[in-house]
Amino acid sequence: MAKAPDPSHTGHSGGSRKNCSVSKTCGGCAYASIPYAEQLKKKEKLVRDLLSGICEVHPIEGAKDPLFYRNKVHWAFGHMGTHLIAGRYAEGSHRIIENDHCLLEDKECAKILSDIRDLAVRFKIRSYDERTRQGLLRRVLLRKGWTTGEIMVVLVLSSPVLPGKKGFIKLLLEKHPSVKTVLININTRSDSMILGDKTICEYGKGYIHDELLGVRFKISPESFYQINHDQTEKLYSLAIEAAALKSGEKLLDAYCGIGTIGLCASASVEGVLLTGVELNRSACSDARDNAKINVGKNSAFGKARFISCDCTKYMLEASAKNEKYDVVFLDPPRAGTTPEFIAACEKLAPKRIVYVSCDPTTLARDLKEFQKHGYKPEYAIPVDMFPLTEHVETCCLLERLRSAKDHISFTLDMEDYYRIKDAEEDKEKR
Ligand code: SAH
C-alpha cells in the first residue's frame, strides 16, 4: 500500500509536469510524468503511424484541463491486517493502491469515496476477501453528471444485507447532498467484473442525469457512458460535423450505448430518422428514455427508435429487407468491429460512415477492411479523451467510393461527349 502526496504540493496546473508518488505502482496514469504538450504529440504520432497510407490525420484535440476529469470512479475495498483499505487496483493485479489524490478522478467523487471508507470503519463493515470469499464490501462505484452535479453511489456487496444500512446512507447524504441516488449491487462473481447481476435502489431514482451538447441523458449504473465530459462534447461535435446530416436522412447509430452520439446528432438537424442499436438492455432502455426526455426540443427525438440487439445481426436483417441508411455511426469497444459488421454495413449503402474508435490499432485494421468494401477513409482526428494515460480516441470519416466511381465514369462520359462533338465540328469545318 502506498500513499500519494497532496496534489497541492506538486504544481498540477495546465500543461506542467504531473507527479503522483504511486503512479509507478498503480500504473493508471502511465503518462503522468510527461508534460501535457508532449503527451499529445506522442498520441498524435501513434495515430499517424498506425493510419499512415490509410488516410490523412488532423492535429489532435487536446483537453483544456487534463486533470481530475473522470466522472466515473470506483475503488476496491480490502484489508491490510485489521485496517480497512480502499483504492484503485494496480494495473493488471488485484493489489489495492490507496491514493486519495488521484490525478484522474473527479475530486468530489474521491472525497465521497474516502468518506465512505470512514463510514465503513465506523459501521464495522468488513471488506470482502477474494481469496477466502468472506466479508461484505467489495467495491464502491460513483458516477457524476458533469453538468447537473448529480452523483450516483453504488455499493457493491457480496450479499444484500448491509448492517446499519439506514444510518449509513443517512450520514452519507447529510455529508454529500449532491448524492442523488444510492444503490446496492450484489456481486457474487469470481471474475473481475465490477458489478454483479442484481441491483437494488436504496435511495433516489436509481439513475442520474447529465447533459451533452444541450441534450439531457439518463444514466443507469450498468450503462456505458463516456468518462470525460468535456472531451466527449468535442468528439461528438467532430463526429456530427463529419456526418454532414441533412433533414430527412436516415441515421444508424451502431454500438449506441444510451444513445448519446445519435441523439446529439439528431438534435443538430431537424427531421433526422435515427435508429440506435445496442447489445446491453439497460443501456438500450436508457436510450429510449433519453429520446423521450428530449422530445420537446426537436421532431427527430419523437421518431428515434432503439433496438436491443447485436448490431451485425440487426444490419444483416435490415439489409435482407432492403433497408438503406444515409449515414452510419459506429463506436465499438476497444476490440473494434468485425468483418461481418463491415460486410453488412456495405449492404445498407450509407454515403458516409463515421467511425469513433477508442483503439487506433483496431481502427487501422477495420479501416483496411472498409476499403475492401468500397469505403474510402477521408480523414481521422485524434481526441485526447484520457489525458495522462496512453489511450487515445479517434474520429474518422469514410465515404462511399461507388459515388466517386460514378463521378469518374460521369467525367469520362463527358470527356467522350466533347471529344466526339469536337471531332464532328472539325469535320464540318473541313
Ligand atoms: N456510442 C456510445 C457507446 C460506446 S461504447 C457512447 O459514446 O457512449 C460501446 C457500446 O457498444 C457499449 O454500450 C456496448 O454495450 C455496446 N456493444 C458491444 N458489443 C456490441 C454488439 N455486438 N452489438 C451492439 N452493441 C454492442
Image: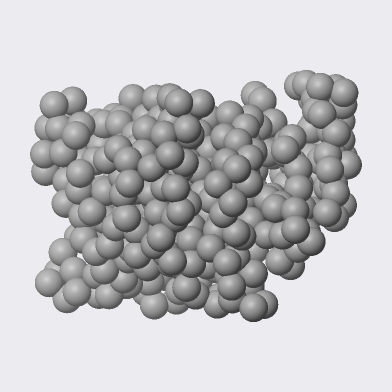
Q: Which of 80 and 296 is in front in this view?
A: 80
The answer, for residue 65, to whether it is visible in the render is yes
Q: Where is residue 421 in the image (x, y as percent from the top left)?
A: 29, 48
- Compared with 273, 271 (above or below) is above
Q: In this view, does 240 lie to the left or right of 235?
A: left
Q: Where is residue 217 in the image (x, y as percent from the top left)?
A: 31, 37
Q: Which of 164 and 284 is in front in this view?
A: 164
Q: Position of residue 298 (x, y in %)?
A: 17, 29
Identify the residue at horizontal 31%, vertical 30% (top origin): 215
- Compared with 189, 275 (above or below) is above
Tally of numbered tags? 0
Please say which color scheme the image uses: one colour
Q: Nearer the viewer, residue 356 or 367?
A: 356
Which image quarter holds the N terminus?
Answer: bottom right
Which image quarter holds the C terminus?
Answer: top left
Q: Where is residue 124 in the image (x, y as percent from the top left)?
A: 59, 51
Identify the residue at horizontal 61%, vertical 60% (top origin): 127
Identify the residue at horizontal 79%, vertical 61% (top origin): 81
Q: Nearer the viewer, residue 377 or 222?
A: 222
- Compared with 136, 152 (above or below) is above
Q: Is residue 372 left or right of residue 98?
A: left
- Compared with 170, 73 (above or below) is below
The answer, for residue 374, to whether it is visible in the render is no
